Amino acid sequence: MESSYFCVFKGARLFLSLQILMICFMHKGHTYGVEGKIASLTASISSLMPSPSCSPSTSKASSRKSTLEVIHKYGPCSHLVQGPNPLNHTKLLLQDESRVKWIQSQSSNSGDGLEGSAAARLPARSGVTIGTGNYVVTIGLGTPKTDLTLEFDTGSRLTWTQCEPCTGSCYNQAEPLFNPSQSSSYANISCTSTSCSQLGHYSGCSGTTCLYSIRYGDQSTTAGFFATEKLTLTPTEVINNFEFGCGQDNQGLFGRAAGLMGLSDDKISIVHQTAAKYGKYFSYCLPSSSSSTGYLTFGKDSGTSSSVSFTPLSKVPQGAQFYGISIEGISVGGTPLSIPSTVFSSGGAIIDSGTVITRLPPTAYSAMRDAFRTAMAKYTTAPAFSLFDTCYDFSKESIVEVPLITFSFAGGVKVHLDFSGMFYFIKASQICLAFAANSADSNLGIYGNTQQKTFDVVYDVAGGKLGFGSNGCS
């Protein structure tokens, strides 16, 4: 990434300029104020646009034994994309809005998260998806193993895949369907077992066999057998008797992924099922663009960054499976915004791997957007797009300097967003501030996956804390 070097002198008198020059220091890609605080970032436009070809990251997690490669489902590294199929931004953002509305609607009912009642009406009506489909990993299932690419989601509890013979229906996926009759390690779960009861109202019975059924927020559905199988994460990491959904009737627009990996805080999620092995501890890094790769790692490892700062996980009324966080403030260009603390505490907030764009209380969003616009006044604006009301035309720029956006979380944790975490790239002439406002300050806030890009995001579920480490994918 090309960078420029600047120093910013705020509030300095002219006759002090010599002393200030001695104090001021420079760092590649950053602009520092006189107090040593990072005020802005600089980068070349060409280096920020997604590449049409795949450039796998040299991840510092590549040596970890329990690590899966994370790929953007719609990027050039993904085998799920058919032909020259550019990312449909309008569709993706509509899916994102659908997911957000569903999450927030749960505050008025029993806290079922993204998954609705088991009384799903099949077949489901067609519509936009719940929006989980940004990032995928490939796992092995069965003996011998079948490789399957699954979307991973911190807001869902059950891991499932489509299975032969699809007695109801299956959507088109990139890989062959999993065939339980060809695996020596497959077994259905009994309807009278404790495991079946842990499904709660997602469970049903067919004779003595436990069934599951889930309707997602957009009426997409999956239903089938609740079963156990050998799960192969990596050649050296195998989970026996892993409980999963073997989907026989799956409808909706899940893309061409084979199913979903549930990473929520729930008894049937992979996090809890592997607690004895990994201690309810996992981490991931989402790549800076769809043309590079990241990772998902289970368990603590010597590769974990020592620079990770932890904030407490909090509980949210929407259900225990969501990971709650406490946002305490936002800074733009190194200057804290004057936002009352009650603005953030009113609705609370979660961190979510499946929501693309961070949703903020409107009071907080307006303050951040106005400060950002003021700092970006020298750049040409572009028309609004979908969720975004602040967009820029960088098509004639080679290098841009933007004010740094910093989130402050409980416990004194400050997260300085990467450039890729501040903007949503539609095209060079339309690059938008990647945030949106909720309809009211009392709505649940959501810290989305765009803002998580390039960080080592660490979930210490047993320890009740969430960590952020910079430069996680490099």
Image: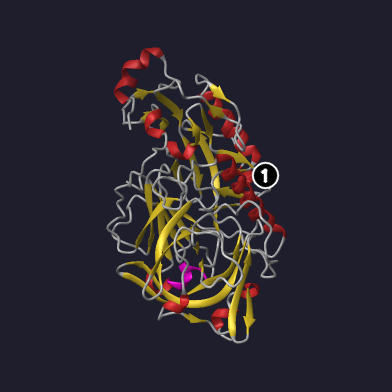
Residue 226 image offset from top left, x and y in percent: 54, 76
Q: Front-most of 12 and 169?
A: 169
User: In the structure shown, which secondary structural element does the residue marked by tag 1 occupy?
Assistant: loop
Query: Is residue 269 part of the magenta span, yes or no?
Result: yes
Q: Residue at x 38, y 26 (%)?
A: 34
Q: How is the image coloured?
A: secondary structure
Residue 108 image offset from top left, x and y in percent: 72, 59
Residue 143 falls in image quadrant? bottom left
Query: Where 89 falls versus 16 (above or below)?
Result: below
Q: Residue furthest top?
A: 15
Query: Is residue 440 part of the magenta span, yes or no?
Result: no
Note whether residue 449 is visible: yes
- Left or right: residue 324 compared with residue 16: right
Q: Amino acid at mark 1?
A: Asp
Count of numbered badges drawn on the protein: 1
- Left or right: residue 192 compared with residue 5: right
Q: Which residues are magenta?
A: 267-274
Query: Where 390 falls versus 269 (above or below)?
Result: above
Residue 69 image offset from top left, x and y in percent: 37, 55
Q: Which residue is mark 1?
A: 441
Query: Where 348 falls versus 250 (above or below)?
Result: above
Estimate how packed mark 1 is, as few (under 14), some (14 to 19) or many (20 or more) residues with alpha carbons within 10 Å.
many
Q: Front-most of 157 and 234?
A: 234
Q: Residue at x 47, y 67 (%)?
A: 177
Note whether residue 444 is visible: no
